Amino acid sequence: MKRDPYEVLGVSPNATDDEVKTAYRNLARKYHPDNYANNPLSDLAEEKMQEINDAYDAIVRMRKGGARGGATGGSAGYGGHSAHNDIRQMINQNRISDAEMLLDGIPSHARDAEWFFLKGSVLYKKGWLEEAYTHFQTACRMDPSNMEYRQALGQMNHFRQTGGYRSADGRGVDACDVCTTLYCADCCCECMGGDCIRCC
Amino acid sequence: MFGYVRLHKPTITMGEYEQYRGVYCTLCKRLGKRYGLTARMTLSYDMTFLALLHMALEQADPRFCPGRCSFNPTKKCLKCQNTVATDLAADLGTLLAYYKLKDTLADEGFFKKLGAAMLYPLMALSRRRAAKRRPEADAAIAAMASAQAQVEAARTDSIDRAAEPFAKLLAYMATLVAQDDKQRVILERFGYCLGRWVYLIDAVDDLADDIKRRRYNPYALSKNLIDTDTDAVRDCRAYASMTLNACLAECVAAYNLLDVRRFDGIIRNILEQGMPASQRRVVSGEDKKHET
């Protein structure tokens, strides 16, 4: 069962194109994969993002009468080459305690940057946010050029600074800030082949 | 019990405020009905929040109707006729209050102990009744209490480990209000992070006191604080603020995935404004404990 695209975006069918776009952008900001990196709920967020993207596409299609791009993926999740592929897979499947056991079995002299990143991801999923944070820091220190680690740390830093809410008295993040960050992130995403936010 | 999960009055609409009061009053009434007058004293914002969240997800309508406050009959308020959510919150709140009281008996000062000792028999009675209705919840809270005692006895300096028992308890409680499996997964994460936030903000609130009386405090231990009123304490508060922000951001992220049927405005007011306001107040260390 497919929900009405206008209902998904929370706008009335009479809304102007700009209103639709604004609603879409706000939702995309809320459910952006970056907000759910390492989160055990990331698959649900991805579903939601997909629903929003589809709704926006559908509306644009209806209004323009023309065809508009096909499906694009959300976040790619963990991938790539690594010495710990089996552990990554477990983390992706939310098999947290299994992954943690394997990680803890790796002797301390063999723990590389990726180990710290993966251990950090496990801790993050468990909700042990402080130790997750220090592990991400260590991973970034050991391999400063790795985008994956830096993104994880950057997302945590963002949450720690702002609390993830938009404060009433203007002490939180300002909307511009989020947009630019998101725009940058999306550009990165786009050059990697994905596109989370369709309108920019 | 804690009172940090509260509304932000300046920005809530009148209608939403009335509804919130309605849930609060209904909870109070159900506490009285199920556990008697003393149990009404355990009424808290935290349990009101749980009831609110439950109603937000429930299919059945809360069915508000006009009523009067039983403590102040001149005051009008709304009452919910559907009491599934408030009954659960009343049971859980009573159980929690009992264990909190036991905790006070174990480690607070003489006068607090005296007060707790006087209340104890009545609360024990209420708790027995609540435990009969919710044996699993009673067991979960008892497990939390003993895990918490272990953490404190071991004087762990890990904030994550210290917060774990209470976070897990709230994760369990939050899953009780889920209406389907998808919600259960989301609420487990939501409850965990909420419980973690509550535990940690309480620890920050008690920081100065705990240092003075040499009581267990995860922040004091992790930062090796021995004296109050030093730069180290100020730094620790700034650090604590970031740890709290991280929990709160996770709560909001999880909540965003829930499709609530009603009360979204109220819940967001609490999560995005009320809780940050509590946090600012506690972190600034201005006035200890809550004004009303």
Image (tube, rainbow, N blue to C red):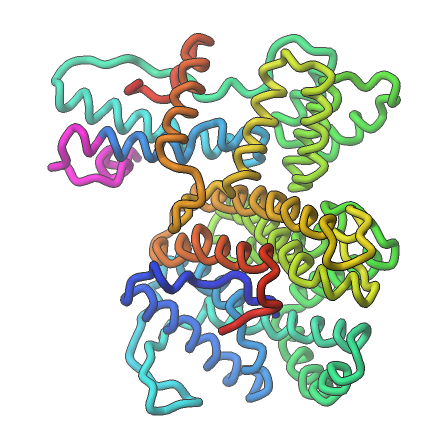
Residue at 58 percent of width and 56 percent of height = B284
- Between B198 and A181, the residue placed more toward the observer is A181
Query: Could you say where residue B252 lies in the image, as x and y percent from the top left?
Result: 48, 45
Is residue B155 within the magenta segment? no
Residue A89 visible to an observer of this rendering: yes
Q: Quadrant of the N terminus of chain A?
A: top left
Q: Is residue B57 visible?
A: no
Q: Give the residues drawn in magenta, as a range.
A: A1-20
What percent of the width, then of the height, locates residue B98?
68, 75
Question: Closer to the camera, A110 or B6?
Answer: B6
Q: Residue at x 14, y 36 (%)?
A: A15
Q: Is residue B254 above or below residue A20?
A: below
Residue A8 part of the magenta-drawn span = yes
Residue B126 location, quadrant: bottom right
Identity of the residue drawn at 65% across and 53% down: B167
Residue placed most toward the observer, B59 or B254: B254
Of residues B74 and B129, the one nearer the viewer is B74
* Quadrant of the rendering where the C terminus of chain A is positioned: top left
Q: x%, y% of residue A159?
A: 54, 37
